Each structure stands twice: as structure tokens, then as C-alpha cells.
Image (cartoon, helix red, strand yellow):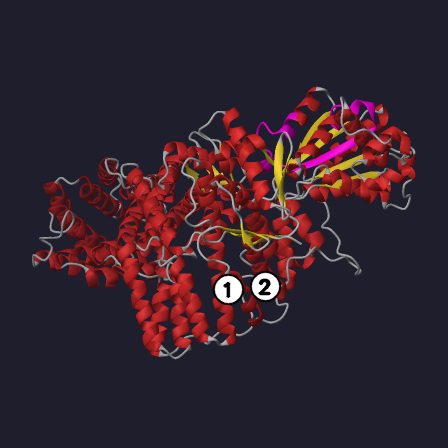
Amino acid sequence: MDQLRLALLGAPQVEVSGAPLRVDTRKAVALLAYLACRSRRHGRDQLAALLWPEGDDAHARAALRRTLSALNHALGASARVAADRTGLELVAPAMDLDIERFRQLVASCDAHGHEPERACASCAEPLAEAVALHRGDFLAGFTLRDAPEFEDWQLAEADTLRREHAGALQRLVGARAVQGRWQAAIADAERWLALDPLHEPAHRQLIRLYAWSGQRGAAMRQYRACVRILDQELGVPPLEETSVLYQQVTEGRVEPPPTPPPAAARPAARPVAAPHGGAPAPPPLVGRQPQWAALQEAWAGVERSGSGRLVALTGEAGVGKTRLAEGFAAHVGSARGRVLVCRCYEGERLAYGPLADGLRAALARPDGTAWARDLEPHWLAEAARLLPELAPLAPPATVPTPDGPGAQGRFLEGLCRTLLAAAAGTRTGLLLLDDLHWADDATMDAVGYLVRRLDRWPLLVLAAWRGEDVPRGHRLRRVAAEAQRAGTAATLTLGRLDRDATAELVRAVAPARAAAVEELYRRSEGLPLLLVSYLAALDDGDGVLPTLPRGARELLQARLERVSAAAWQLLTAAAVIGRSFDVDTVRDASGRSDDEALAAIEELVRLGLIHEVTGPSTSYDFSHEQVRLLVYEQAGLARRRLLHRRVAQVLGGLARGRGGEGQAASVAHHFQLAGRDAEAAEWFAQAGERAAALYANREAVAHYQAALALGSPDDAAHLQLALGDLHTLLGEYGDALAAYEAAAARCEPGQLAVVEHRLGRLHHRRGDWEAAEVHLEAALAALTAGEGAAGGEEAGTAAFRARLVADHSLTAHRRGRTDQAAGLAAQALELAEAAGDPAALAQCHNLVGMLAAGAGDLERAPHHLERSLAFAEMLPDPTARVAALNNLALTHQAAGRLDQAIELATAALDLCTAQGDRHRQAALHNNLADLFHAAGQPDEAMRHLKQAVAIFAEVGERDRLEPAIWQLVEW
């Protein structure tokens, strides 16, 4: 048999029966390559516009006709481009296409019983044969400068095939390593690295291979080559994983070489097994009650009226359209209704193919051809033109003439009547058209003809299709819209399962996995196909959820393969940004123009990979987190780092002046993933400051710790001091003490007084009055010795000295030294008044008022406490206000004014809760419990007491709760 051979991986080579194809135009080669790679029927207008975009329609179609004639002449008997008035497709019974062979060879390794990312010794031969087919990039050196859309398609295909080539080489290297063929593995790894010299995983694999083969020096040189190219091209150091591997090489403790994976370790995802053996059973229908009820009502309506109806079942891939449609078809069959199933397949563009398959299945039923014998002979003869099996049933005299006026109409009428007869029975029939988005044009002609005449026949047509594969203006949508306007159609849209439905499905399919419902829902986001894939992976594996099960990966990968090169670039940038993104950020990060970015976004929305999020500003979200993760994974480390850096720079420009903690943290996160640790540390520190200003204390701690972990030596003392303050508010006194001590070890001499002051206040909170006094005296000594003169805004000022003396007075008061406390309080107030600082004045008036109240002077105490509150209200920090309000409340309590005392203490509690000061929050609950008890409200008193006990239990160090912590009443 004559054979057509196409080698498109590299410079195009086309052979017909062993001889080169001889055509006089590059457009003929382009047309042949396009038709071979996209094996389906194409419209003439589409191809004319693709290859001759600059000419008008008439000239473009004429050029296509000439090229088609020349190409068919050159192909001879080996193949032909079958054409009619509207479209054409390549028919090649014996075609050898290197791209198809490459993919078949790689796919053959998936049958070896291990996961795709692993390799066994048997993988080596097919993978080696596959990578040998890659002589270069797709159509290397071949261009059509006057056909930009063709070049866009060529670039997109080249990019996809380059990724597949890299994946095959990675697997081949793994197979060579399993075999112990080190030199072959090294050679293949070098080919893998040559595709992208910035790909760090390839560098790491080469380092391992050199180490496994006893070439430690070569392994070390490979690491240094990795460091050099990353620094030159991206300005970033290697990942920690790479540096750790280098350290292992130098120490001679590299992990052992891989061993062959166990046979059938993790087979492909399978359907859920039937309870008592036998064929696998489909998962039960859950969460589809409204759609099921609508289908039953539509079927009953057809039975009542005798008029047909169309129900369009739409939804994204994997949402369960086929499962619902097949379940309803089984229900109709069990009710003695006849069902005819016609299923479309991706890539199959045979005219009327799905309908012919459905009719052949009907002929194979137990009743055989009985249904066909009831057809009128001339209609049966028309259908026999498509289905030769029907020809013996049609009288010879009725054989139709395929040409002439009305021939097409007669054929469609005969075909539709045959479909009706196959679905007819004692009850209303059901015609199931599944995956109709893949239907060929001829099948769509027949479906449209049938739907427009449904009122004549008692037939329910259930048509299922993917919404993302049927763009606006598609003829399928037009047919459904026409039927809806005529009142003979309805549309059912399937959404994802909610948490309750997910739990129900898990309990039905895998009751032993009920504890994992939340994690399964988070991973699957309610998409049934993903959920069932995860359950199958759990059953087949070690009980640990995989990142993405094989079946789910294949589904999502198939959706990604239709993305153009420009849209893929933008999608990769979006995946780096995160689950949600806005147009401006993704455009700037991807480097695309406004028009290119908008066109790419429209394409991605049309494919159902992203969707628009309604809100005050336009933003977009991935249709599924697993889609984002898969795109991110395929981007390659070097590109991810580059994009993270771009995103950080874009967001950094937006964050300046906005004051948003989340924005600063996001910038830091992206700089960290870009390998820019110094810039990441700077932004984490800013995020910590902004979070602390909003009293988001836990978040602030996390940001400051991230900044320190990334290395901020110039700012380490300040960050540790801030961390100590936050841990103090949270009641984590052990962590606070460690942070303050770290600050003391790193700070400049001029800041030591500030750190000693913080340590003194911390020990005061802990009830360790002696330690508090020691640190406060050390702070005062540092000030007196002049060490605080360069201490910045706090240390070395009269206001700071006043606050130090006030805290020393409070400690003396706690130790029972009444006279010393009074003297120090008076000195502190004098210093504060001289400084005129509101913070110092608020603290010192509060202290004097508190001491006066303790001495029973209820006339002098309120005066100072009211002054303290007035100064405190001038400050952004609520700490002084909380103290003044609490002490005023205690003063009113002593005077018997319980209502005022409760009001003041409640206001103090509200401020303290917002600030997040856990210890003082507990003390205020305790004080309010006493107040409500004294006011004769035992229920309120008990409520506050319980909250006080719960918070006190969390304050301090684990298993070392200081008894004095409970004694905090005033401060």
C-alpha cells in the first residue's frame, strides 16, 4: 500500500511512497501539515483565511482551490484531501506522522503499571525511540510570513511539543538510571537541560547522575554551572533543594539511585467496584435531584402531548453530564421506554458517524430489525444510503437518486424517521446525544433538522454538551435557542456538588473515607470526576491523597492542550499570580499588550479555564485550583521565578501608598518565590508593620518571622523587638522573652535602654517583680550613663525617662513599697510635664490616680485618672485608654457607682479585645465579673468569669502558669 510519511519534528520532510513530495508552493506543505495535525474536517473559509489572510474572500478561495489541486496531484494514491463545497479533510489510510508516533510511544509506558512521573527499565526503549524522532522544533525553519495566524498556530504547537519532549527526556533519564546505564542517562539529561538551561530540576538530576556514577568532581562542576547561569540570566541563587543536594555531594551522602517501581503499583483511576463483584458500577447520582425531576417532567410531558421535546444538558467537563444522562436513560429503559444512544468523540469527524453508530447498536438489540421493518420503504432506502445494513430491507425499486432537487431534504427526513423508529416502542422514546460539542457538521445538520420538527414526533431528545466547548454563536446554541423560542426545548445546567452532596457521595462510594470529606471537597471543589478520581486513588494507594490523580490529570491536560501560545503565556502568568487575578496585573506580568491580553482572556473564558468574578472591579478566577496548579507545574522553574519577580514588581508599585497588609505580604511572597530573599524580607517586614497597626497580631508575627528567616541583619533588632511586643499582647511570654533577649543581643548600644525597658515590663506582667525591677534599673542606668543618647525617637528623651520611672514606681507598688512608689510617681509626673509628651502624661497621671485610689483618696484619684484618659484619647495606641478606663471603673466601684463602673469597664474591654491584649482582656473579664456580682446580676457575672478563666489558661508559658498572673486587677 502506498504510504504518506510526514516528519514535522524539525525541518518538514514529506514522502509519498518513499519519494519526496513535489509541490511548487510552501502553502501546500502548510496545508498538509495543518490537516495532518488537526485530523478533522475544516471549513473552506477557515482555511482560506488561515493561509491567505491578506486577499479578499474570492481570491483566497481560488488560491485554496489551486493549492488543493496541486497537493492532491502530488499525493497520488497514498492520500487525498477530500473536499466538498463547504469543507475538506485529509484522508490517508496509511499515514506515518512522527508526532503521532512520538505520542504513542510515550503513552505506551503508561501501561507498565506505574505512575507517569516514574519510570521502569522497560520504559527506556520506547522513550529512546520517541525522543529520537525529535530532530528539532516543530516545522523548524518553515515560515509563512504572510500568514500570521498560521505562524501563531505553528508556535503554539512547537511550544506544546517542546514541553512533551522535555517530559519524555525526563522519563528516559529516570529509566536509564533504573537500568544503571549512567553514561546514557547523563547524555539524555544533557539533552533535557539543553532544551532549557535554566531548568533547575534538570541540573539536579545531572548532579545526581554524576554522583551515582562516581564522578564527584563533575557533580560539583555541574552545581557551579547551575549557580552561574541562574545568576547571569535571572540574578537569583539556586533553590535550597539544589544547595542541599550539593552539600550532600561534597559530604558523600547522596541518596541511593532509584529502584524499579513495583509492578502495577498504582494503576489508572478506575470506576468504583460493584458491591458483589462483576462489572464496575458507576458512582451514584447525588446532588442532582432538581435536574432529575426536570428530566422526568419533560419525558412525562412528551407522553401526555405526543409532541417531542429537546432538553439540553450543559456544564463543564467532569461535572457529571454523561453520568446523569446515562442514569436517566437506564430509568427510561426500566420503564419499558426505548432508548437510542448516539455518542460523539473528539477527533472523529465522520459525516453522520454518531448517528450511524447509534443505529447499528439498535440493529444489534434482541429485537433485531423489527423496528426497521415498520418504516416506509422509501424512507428506509434513504437511511440505507448511510447504513448499508438496512439495504436488504428496502425494496430495490425504492433505491433513491443521490442527486437532484430535494435530495438532501429527502435524506434528512429518512434519517430522522429512522432514528425515531429505532427509539419508538410502547412508550415515549429517548434519543440521547452525548458530547454533542464534538459533533461533525453533517450530524449537526441532521440534529437541527430533527429538533425543528419535534412537534411531529413523540420523542424526547436529551443532548449533552460542554458549555466551554460551544462558544457564543455556535450552531448548537442557535438550534437550542430556536427550539426554546418555539416552546419545545429547555436547558439544564449542571453545577458542582456542594459540601453536603460531596459528603453523601463519599459515604456512598467509600464510607471508610468519610473522615476525609473536607479535604476531598477542598481538592475536588465539588467536581464529581475529580472527586471519584481521588477516591479511586485512595483505594489503590497508601491512603494518602495524591497531588492530582492520573485520570483527573488527563482530563485537565486535555483542556489545556487547546490553548494558543499567547493565551498559554498569559495563563502561566495568571497561575503564578494565584487563584484570582486582575487584567492589569496579568497583562504587565505576561508582557502582553492590552489587545493581546484581552484576546487571550476571552479565549480562556471561552474554553472554561477561567471565569469572570463579579464585584466592584473586574477580576478573573481559575475554574479550578487544580487547573492553576497544573499550569504552574508545567511552566518550568526558571519561567516561574521570572514571572514571580514581575508580579512582585507590579504589585509592589500598587502596594506603595495603599497601606494594605495583604498586598505587602503578597509582594513579599512573590519576591521569595522569585529567589529575591533580601527584597522579600523587606516586604515581609512592611507587611508585619501594617498587620500590627491593624492588630492582626498573629499575621504580624508570621510576617516578622518570615522577614527574619530570610535574613534582615540590618533590621534584626527592630524586628525582634516588634516580635516581642506582639508575643506580649498574645500572652506568649516565653516567646516574648526570647525575642527581647535576641533584640538585646543584636541592638546598637543606644537602643539597649529600650530593650531593657521592654524586658522589665514583660517580667512585671509575669508577676516576677524582682526581675522586673532589675531590668528597669538597668534601663535607667543605661540612660544615666548616656548610652541612650543615640536611641532614636524613644530612648534618651525626657518622656522616655518619665515612663521608665513610672514603671519603676508601679513595680515598687507591687512589692509593697508604698513610700518609694509615691516618690517615684511624683518624679515621673514631673518629668512627663516637663517633656509635654501625651503618652508619658497619660501613663503618669494614670499611675498617680491609681496610687491615690489604693490609698483611699477617692477625691484625688478621679482627677488624675480623668486627666490620664484625656491624654490617652490623643494617642493612636489604645493601651493607655484601656488602663485609664479600667482604673476609673475601679474608682467608681469603690464609691458605689456600679452602673458607671460597668460602663467604663465594658468600654475598656472592647478596646482591649480589638487590640488583642489577651492577659489584660482576661483581667477585665474578671473585673466585670466582680462588678456584675456586686450589682446583683449573677448570670452576667458567671459569663464573664468563665471567659476570664478560659483566657487566663492560655496566658504565660505552657505548664508554667505564674500564680501572680491571676492577680492582675489594675495597671
Q: Residue at x 20, y 53 (%)?
A: 809
Query: Which residue range is magenta in the image?
Result: 450-478
579, above or below 57, in the image = below
Residue 592 seen anywhere in this rendered image of the structure: yes
Q: Residue furthest top?
A: 486
Quarter of the image where the N terminus is located: bottom right
What residue does disc 1 label? Answer: 171
Residue at point 42%, 30% (across, down) = 617
Task: Give the residue type at disc 1.
Answer: Arg
- The front one of 67 and 778 is 67
> SS for tag 1?
helix
Question: In the drawing, does residue 431 fall left or right of residue 959?
Answer: right
Q: Position of residue 593 (x, y in %)?
A: 36, 35
Tell me the tag on residue 59.
none
Q: Quadrant of residue 869?
A: top left
41, 799: nearer the viewer = 41
Q: CA distance from mark 1 to mark 2?
A: 10 Å
Could you tell me residue 575's position as x and y percent? Answer: 44, 46
User: Label 2, on which residue?
Assistant: 109
Which of these two is toward me, 127 or 900? 127
- Res. 768 in view: no
**For this view, does 72 lie left or right of residue 213?**
right
State left or right for residue 690 relative to residue 178. left
